[in-house]
Image: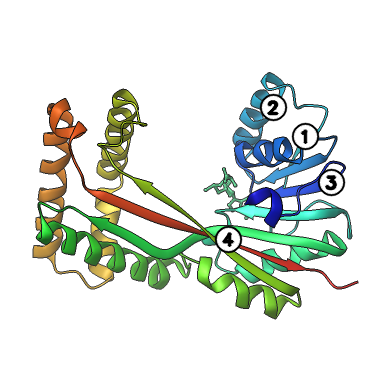
Amino acid sequence: MYKQFLGLRPELRLVDVGCGTGDFTRYLVRLCSGSCTAVGVDNKQQSLQAASADTRREGLSKQISYKLGNVLNIPIADDYSDLTCCRTVLMHLQDPQKAVREMTRITKPGGLVAAIEGGRMISFLDPRDEQYTELSHEANQAWLKAVRRVEGKEFKIGERLPSIFQETGLHDIQSEIHADAWLYCDPRRRLEDIKAQLEFESSLSKESRKRDRKYLEAGGLSQAKIGHYYRKHDRRVKELLSDDRKLRTDTSFYGATFILVTGRKGQ
Ligand SMILES: C[S@@+](CC[C@H](N)C(=O)[O-])C[C@H]1O[C@@H](n2cnc3c(N)ncnc32)[C@H](O)[C@@H]1O
């Protein structure tokens, strides 16, 4: 889908803004399967160092270079690229349209601007605990509302991309959805990977809990519900991590979507 939708081809000149450690940049370059060139831009020097090291290791240094810079003021000349894209970057900005304007500026007339961002279609169901399912949904909605209010950011910005692109003056706007499903009982996933992921997510959740509690409250969840939600959440993680058989037979369903949008710069 990416190859066709983003028009990936040999000889393409692409720029990936907010590239982080360059995973997506390298993925796109491989999909081009030819001598395309790519520039990754990010405002975190440390991420770019990791990106360069991984790119060398993967033998792609001739095709990919990285530049330190801000997506609101991209250090690349006008009309440079055939494709300018970003993945999960606009969600972090208070003025995403400014970034899309910059992405458009550096794109050749007739070239493509593309963004891939999280969408609102999110699904979670624990078939053995409808109450926790409902509470998780409420907590998710409250958290998104608080990010909007407190930080002025739209975390699930995917569905807004077509209008942002149109207001920026891009045309031929197109969209696709990419959805992911997670099931702990899915045999294609290795037990040690699932456990490592659960442990990592649990430690992240504990690290940011003080801030998240404030956000959940700002988003309209009562203190009692917040306490109840975290108690159930922690008990659940503990149970799953202490019993491999339970983890391997857990049928809780998680689904999330990414919205891909492209727009063409006028000639
Ligand atoms: C969630 S990461 C996504 C990384 C990469 N696009 C990927 O999909 O693997 C968001 C990235 O955006 C970068 N970023 C956020 N705001 C930025 C800005 N104003 N200018 C440049 N990079 C920015 C962060 O440093 C981070 O690397």
Which residue carries the number 3 mark? 12
Q: Residues within 10 Å of mark 1 (few under 14, many from 20)?
A: many
* Residue type of the residue flagged with mark 2: Thr
Disc 2 C-beta below 8 A from ligand 1: no
Q: Residues within 10 Å of mark 3 (few under 14, many from 20)?
A: some
* Residue type of the residue flagged with mark 3: Leu
**Along the horizontal axis of the image, is 102 left or right of 220?**
right
Q: Is residue 58 visible?
A: yes
- N-terminal of the pair, mark 4 or mark 2, is 2
The image quadrant of residue 58 is top right
**Along the horizontal axis of the image, is 63 left or right of 100?**
right
Front residue (pair 103, 240): 240
Residue 18 position, x and y percent, is 64, 49
Q: Name the secondary structure under disc 1.
A: strand
Residue 259 position, x and y percent, is 54, 62
Q: CA distance from mark 1 to mark 2?
A: 7 Å
Q: Nearer the viewer, mark 1 or mark 3?
A: 3
Residue 90 marker: 4
* Residue type of the residue flagged with mark 4: Leu
